[in-house]
Image: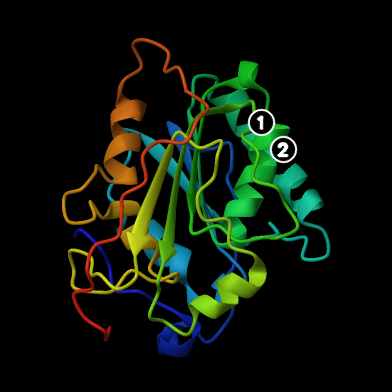
Amino acid sequence: MLAGQPVCAAVASAELRQPLPQQPLTDSGQGAAVIFIGGFGDEISGIMPQAQRLLPPLAALETRAYYHWHAGYPQSSEQGAAALAGHIRDYRRANPAADVVLIGHSMGAAMALRTAHLLRPAEGRVFLLTLDPADRSLKPLRPPSATWWGNAYVVESLSAHDYIAVLGGRWNSCQGADVNLRFDGRRRDEAGYHYIHDNALSLLMSRNCGEHASLFDSLRALLVSKAGKYSPSGAAATDSQPQAPTGTTR
């Protein structure tokens, strides 16, 4: 599957009537720690749990976890980031060579960034993926711990739900990211859906009509290549440019 059907609060399935619980990272797992962090309201809409369920494996051996954008501390995202960083350190004590992958969507991307700032480069490799990040309270500066940072964002969206991300303070292109992928909301992904804020799986998996490698493919290549330390540039990479619109309805 290249890009899944977007899920948002307005079309969430009946099985998501109750808030989805977090699935914290535990030290009983093995391999790379792949951590999905949902945005505001994700515990109801199920956007990142869907991505967690449908995203193919990133590494030969991995352990997946799911957190809300506050990691259980809705009154203080800083406390949430500290708690998540603690879980990561506990995991690494049991798995010293484990890579850590932080995949955050919307305000969950800000949570991922806060957490990465609390980790030290000497503790191991950290790969950061931010999917249409939004949080006007946080400046998107590159964390020293980031081995690689891939960022994807949407412009010209046709979905009314994207106004929530705009009000929240969309980051769009992040200067400190190694890769910035720009998706034109007037275009469709490989599954036929327009690029919108809620379609996090498409932002991860889509090649944008072949214009560039997907974040998924780029990250998987880095994770499987243990030989040779990756040297991040610390600078933004080429954005994909919007094309003529291919439709006006999703």
Above or below residue 153? Residue 99 is: above
195 relative to 120, above or below:
below
Seen at 55% across and 39% down, the residue is 175
Q: Can you give x and y, in whole percent of width and height, for residue 11 in the image?
A: 41, 88
Residue at which label 2 appears: 86
- The percent coordinates of residue 176 (x first, y second) are 56, 35
**Residue 203 location (% of width, % of height):** 36, 57
| Closer-to-camera residue (20/105) | 105
Is residue 87 visible in this depiction of the protein?
A: no
Which element type, helix, strand or loop, lies under badge 1? helix
Few, some or many residues within 10 Å of mark 1 (<14, 14–19, 20+) = some
Q: Secondary structure at mark 2?
A: helix
Taking 197 as reference, is 92 left or right?
right
Image-based side of 106 in relation to 137, left or right: left
Q: Residue at x 28, y 30 (%)?
A: 221
Q: CA distance from mark 1 to mark 2?
A: 5 Å
- Position of the C terminus by quadrant: bottom left
Above or below, comparing residue 180 to residue 1 in the picture: above
| The N terminus, quarter of image | bottom left
Residue ID for mark 1: 89
Q: Residue furthest top?
A: 228
Question: In the displayed structure, does residue 160 sit left or right of residue 145?
Answer: left
